[in-house]
Image: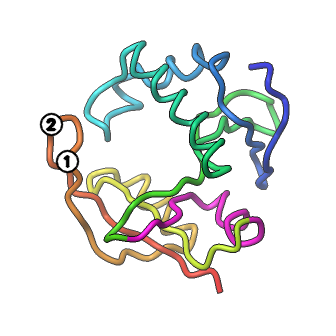
């Protein structure tokens, strides 16, 4: 990981753009069945490269996407996290995590941030709730030939 240009810093983490040089670290995570349990599949080499390419396009198009999360304390790669636009009920909304809520408000002028989380992924639901998000409903997302219930959590920023 040579891209040392951090785009944003939270309390414990720094964030930088993902690029193809991050393949090894991302592959370690995306090919681990325990890490990817909520997705119900792991990624192939081709899917990982496509995923990285999508993030690069999101950066160009929207200025946001998933980013490498780096521990400030250990300087180690922790995972991927970020802020990105999603289509939801005919609207283009920001989807993000606690670390990115302030960024969405201060840098993007967002009024609301959403999280769409598999209903079976209770650790991620708890993370969103600790960030101040409340469950607003649910929807079925068709992914990888499966119907998966997702909870809609959101927080108003104004």
Q: Nearer the viewer, residue 9 or 58?
A: 58
Q: Horizontal placement of 20 versus 1: left or right? A: left
* Residue picked out by circle 2: 145
Q: How far apart, in angstroms, are the residues tagged by discs 1 and 2?
A: 6 Å
Q: Residues within 10 Å of mark 2 (few under 14, many from 20)?
A: few
Residue 27 shows which numbered tag? none
Q: Position of residue 89 (x, y in %)?
A: 31, 71
Q: Position of residue 66 (x, y in %)?
A: 58, 42
The residue shown at (28%, 28%) is 41
* Quarter of the figure with residue 44: top left
Question: Which residue ends up furthest to the bottom in the rendered image?
Answer: 158
Residue 142 shows which numbered tag? 1
* Quarter of the figure with residue 108: bottom right
**Looking at the image, residue 150 lies above or below residue 156:** above
Q: Nearer the viewer, residue 122 or 82?
A: 82
The residue shown at (70%, 74%) is 109
The residue shown at (21%, 35%) is 144
Cβ–Cβ under 8 Å for marks 1 and 2: yes
Question: Which residue ends up furthest to the front in the rendered image?
Answer: 61
The residue shown at (39%, 21%) is 47
Magenta span of residues: 91-107
**Looking at the image, residue 93 lies above or below residue 70:** below
Q: Position of residue 97 (x, y in %)?
A: 57, 58
Q: Position of residue 50 (x, y in %)?
A: 45, 24
Image quarter in which the C terminus is found: bottom right
Q: Horizontal placement of 11 versus 83: left or right? A: right
Numbered disc 2: secondary structure: loop
């Amino acid at each position: 990981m040579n891209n040392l240009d951090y785009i944003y810093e939270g309390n414990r983490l720094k964030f930088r753009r993902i690029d193809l040089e991050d393949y090894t670290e991302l592959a370690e995570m995306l090919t681990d069945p325990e890490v990817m349990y909520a997705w119900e599949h792991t990624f192939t080499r081709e899917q990982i490269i496509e995923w990285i390419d999508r993030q690069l396009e999101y950066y160009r198009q929207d200025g946001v996407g998933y980013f490498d999360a780096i521990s400030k304390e250990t300087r180690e790669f922790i995972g991927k996290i970020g802020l990105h636009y999603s289509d939801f009920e005919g609207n283009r909304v920001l989807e993000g995590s606690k670390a990115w809520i302030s960024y969405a408000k201060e840098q993007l002028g967002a009024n609301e941030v959403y999280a769409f989380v598999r209903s079976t992924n209770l650790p991620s639901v708890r993370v969103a709730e600790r960030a101040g998000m409340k469950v607003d409903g649910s929807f079925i997302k068709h992914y990888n030939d499966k119907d998966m219930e997702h909870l809609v959590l959101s927080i108003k920023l104004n």
